[in-house]
Image (cartoon, helix red, strand yellow):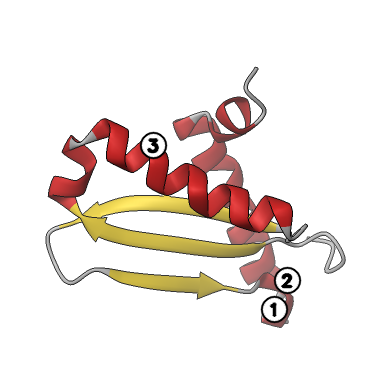
Amino acid sequence: MDEEKSPLIIVFYLARDMFTNVDMMTNYTNSIKNYFDENGDNVRIFFFPTDNEERLECINPVYYNDEEQKQKIGRLLLLAEKQFDIQKNINNE
């Protein structure tokens, strides 16, 4: 994973019931995405439901020195993009 191009990964764990209100989630996720886009930040954002406490986790791949860990993060990102069709949704294709 190239350090210059490695995105910061931000994972939002939100209350499961928030995901039942599609309009609210769409507005919420779009406002967060727009904020990062307008600032030109290299960020990948993921939203997952949780039945536990809501939280925010941040992974900065640049700080992983172990090549195996960097490859694991890269594979996880590709899997998430494929599974959730993230790039297609982001690019409105």
x and y, in percent, of residue 49 in the image: 24, 51
Q: In the visual, does 75 lie left or right of 24?
A: right
Viewer-closest of 52 and 74: 52
Asked where in the image residue 62 lies, by quadrant, the reply is bottom right
**Element type at mark 3:** helix
Which amino acid type corresponds to the residue marked 2 in the rendered image? Glu
**Element type at mark 2:** helix
x and y, in percent, of residue 2 in the image: 84, 62
Residue assigned mark 1: 66
Are there few (<14), some (14-19), or many (20+) residues within 10 Å of tag 3?
A: few
Q: Which mark is residue 67?
A: 2
**Element type at mark 1:** loop
CA gap between label 1 and label 3 equals: 36 Å
State yes or no: discs 2 and 1 in contact (Cβ < 8 Å): yes
Q: In the visual, does 23 lie left or right of 68?
A: left
CA gap between label 2 and label 1 equals: 4 Å
Which amino acid type corresponds to the residue marked 1 in the rendered image? Asp
Q: Does 3 appear above or below 76? A: below
Q: Does label 1 or label 3 sit earlier along the sequence? A: 3
Residue assigned mark 3: 26
Total tally of numbered discs in the picture:
3
Q: Is residue 76 visible?
A: no
Which amino acid type corresponds to the residue marked 3 in the rendered image? Thr
